[in-house]
Image (spheres, grey):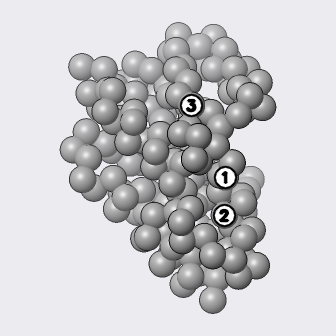
């Protein structure tokens, strides 16, 4: 049984995230979606809220577990018996950073990273853009799952 780990901040989860998660779930026996609880950032949603949103979005996928973590990704990966880390890439610019992280994670733990390109229709999409557009009153309903849209409206009004 192969266990994959798909980490991210997911603040908020977007349709691009959902695309990558669902495609990963189809390729691996077990998928752990890991919400980074980064205390140095000021997220719009707490890690618990992001876990709840992602759990709701993926509740139809039997092989997906959603959890949050602090600290090193490789330590969390070890604790969950992860065989491979999966990272979505939107553009070539993502690759430069993600390759460096993948090499560091492999050096620290021996765990390989696999890259999966985001579907072209979501390649421009980021949580940062969604937050900014939503804060300024723009319509992001086509960019995020419905449960995220509802939660954004509640948070920003």
**Residue position marked by numbered label 2 in the rendering:** 130
**Residue position marked by numbered label 3 in the rendering:** 117
Q: Which quadrant is home to the N terminus?
A: top left
Q: Earlier in the sequence, mark 1 or mark 3?
A: 3
Dot 2 and dot 1 residues touching (CB under 8 Å): yes
Disc 3 versus disc 2: distance between alpha carbons?
20 Å
Q: Which quadrant is home to the C terminus?
A: bottom right
The outermost residue toward the bottom is 157
Q: Earlier in the sequence, mark 3 or mark 2?
A: 3
Rendered location of residue 65, percent (x, y): 33, 44
In this figure, what is the number of numbered marks?
3
**Residue 24 visible in image:** yes
- Which quarter of the picture shows residue 107? top right
In the image, 147: left or right of 101?
left
Residue at point 49% right, 25% down? Answer: 85
Rendered location of residue 31, percent (x, y): 35, 35
**Residue 75 visible in image:** no
- Category of crowding for the residue at label 1, using alpha-carbon neighbours closer than 10 angstroms: few (below 14), some (14–19), many (at least 20): some
Disc 1 versus disc 3: distance between alpha carbons?
14 Å
Rendered location of residue 47, percent (x, y): 53, 59
SS assignment at label 1: loop
SS assignment at label 3: strand
Residue at point 32% right, 26% down? Answer: 28
Dot 1 and dot 3 residues touching (CB under 8 Å): no
Disc 2 versus disc 1: distance between alpha carbons?
6 Å
Q: Is residue 154 above or below residue 139?
A: below
């Amino acid at each position: 049984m192969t266990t994959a780990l798909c980490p991210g901040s997911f603040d908020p989860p977007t349709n691009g995230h959902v695309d990558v998660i669902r495609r990963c779930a189809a390729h691996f026996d077990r998928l752990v979606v890991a919400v980074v609880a980064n205390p140095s950032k000021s997220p719009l949603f707490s890690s618990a809220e992001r876990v709840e949103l992602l759990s709701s979005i993926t509740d139809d996928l039997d092989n997906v577990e959603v959890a949050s973590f602090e600290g090193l990704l490789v330590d969390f990966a070890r604790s969950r018996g992860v065989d491979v880390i999966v990272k979505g890439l939107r553009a070539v610019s993502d690759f430069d950073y993600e390759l460096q992280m993948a090499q560091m994670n492999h050096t620290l733990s021996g765990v390989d990273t696999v890259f999966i390109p985001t579907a072209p229709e979501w390649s421009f999409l980021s949580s940062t853009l969604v937050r900014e557009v939503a804060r300024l009153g723009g319509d992001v309903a086509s960019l995020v799952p419905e449960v995220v849209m509802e939660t954004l409206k509640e948070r920003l009004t």
